Amino acid sequence: MNSKAQELIDVWQRGNVLAETCPSRPILSHLTSRWGVLVMIVLATGTHRFSELRRKAAGVSERMLAQTLQQLEADGFVARKAHAVVPPHVDYSLTPLGQEAAAHVIALTDWIETALPRILAETKAA
Amino acid sequence: MNSKAQELIDVWQRGNVLAETCPSRPILSHLTSRWGVLVMIVLATGTHRFSELRRKAAGVSERMLAQTLQQLEADGFVARKAHAVVPPHVDYSLTPLGQEAAAHVIALTDWIETALPRILAETKAA
DNA sequence: AGTAATACTTACAAAAATGTATGTACTTCC
DNA sequence: GGAAGTACATACATTTTTGTAAGTATTACT
């Protein structure tokens, strides 16, 4: 059996982000995308509405927030609950899977935030 | 004192990725960039040459690898050591700071790789 | 003399991400 | 009657990212 075929089989057991076509790569990119990271962090603190997320993740446009939420929902990390009222009311929260993912994303960003003074001290100008 | 000024001061103690202009954001984006993640993972397994990194991080172009390495080096996560020989020989490794960062990046990717079957099972078509 | 090897850089092109502005639906409030 | 409020979608423009191809320097091998 060639290595390509082996890779396909392995995915049923475990992904490998180093492999070019592994389905873990798009998942990783959604989770580590510019806004994906921030959305996960905010949702980890509890259920939020669209507009609340927009305010807390400073800098996101409506368009990007909507797109990001749809990706995370499609990946099974975010649950969307729309209430049939006018004006619209939609609640976003993390699924159990999303909570697991968020824990790691937060561990990373938390480290960065904490280590920032040390990092900045060693950073060479861009 | 206004909140903008407070933000500037706080950075000396701790970053906040939710803040639009916090210097932690570019750091985060370098670490979570498409190739940044892979480079950190590979370097965490030991010192590598440019060409070795290129092979292990399947899919990177020379241009992107060079650029990624320069960013990570500027941030103080990667150490570059060039040997003055012909043909060129350059070794890349993680700094102590880089090793701390890598640990978290790996925790995340490792979780994704492990959870991949579960994730794929819940994933809605793109 | 021509080719290979390594770690890049540079110019150019194509693709992807992101932003801006505008529209929608329906109800409540002024 | 007109404005506000919410959660989006859509078209379009711009910016950023990424890739491709080619070039560079020096030595060794054929």
Image (cartoon, coloured by chain):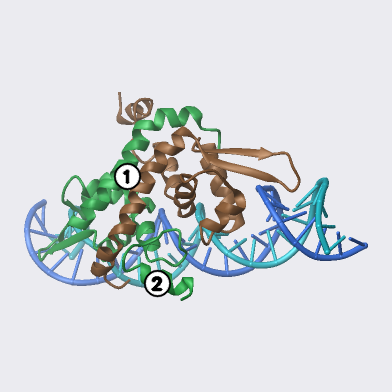
Chain colours: A brown, B green, C cyan, D blue
Q: What whole-number distance in Å separates the C-alpha atoms at marks 2 and 1?
A: 40 Å
Q: Is A47 left, or right, of A25 in this rendering?
A: right
Instruction: From this view, report whether residue A73 is shown above or below residue D4.
Output: above
How many numbered tags mark residues here?
2
Q: Which residue is mark 1?
A: B58
Determine the residue positioned at 58% across, 53% down. A52
Mark 1, other Cα within 10 Å: few <14 / some 14–19 / many ≥20: some
Q: Nearer the viewer, residue B57 or C12?
A: B57
As shown in the figure, which amino acid type bears the numbered disc 2? Leu
- Chain name for mark 1: B
As shown in the figure, which amino acid type bears the numbered disc 1? Ala
User: Residue B15's image quarter?
Assistant: bottom left
Q: Work out whether disc 2 and disc 1 sit on a shared chain.
A: yes
Chain-order first, disc 2 or disc 1: 2
Instruction: From this view, report whether residue B40 is shown above or below residue A6.
Output: below
Q: Which residue is mark 2?
A: B8
Determine the residue positioned at 38% across, 31% down. B115
Determine the residue positioned at 23% across, 68% down. A122
Numbered circle sitting on residue B124: none
Q: Nearer the viewer, residue C12 or B90?
A: B90
Q: Is A1 left, or right, of C6 in this rendering?
A: right
Where residue A75 sits in the image (x, y, percent)? Answer: 50, 37
Where residue A32 sits in the image (x, y, percent)? Answer: 42, 49
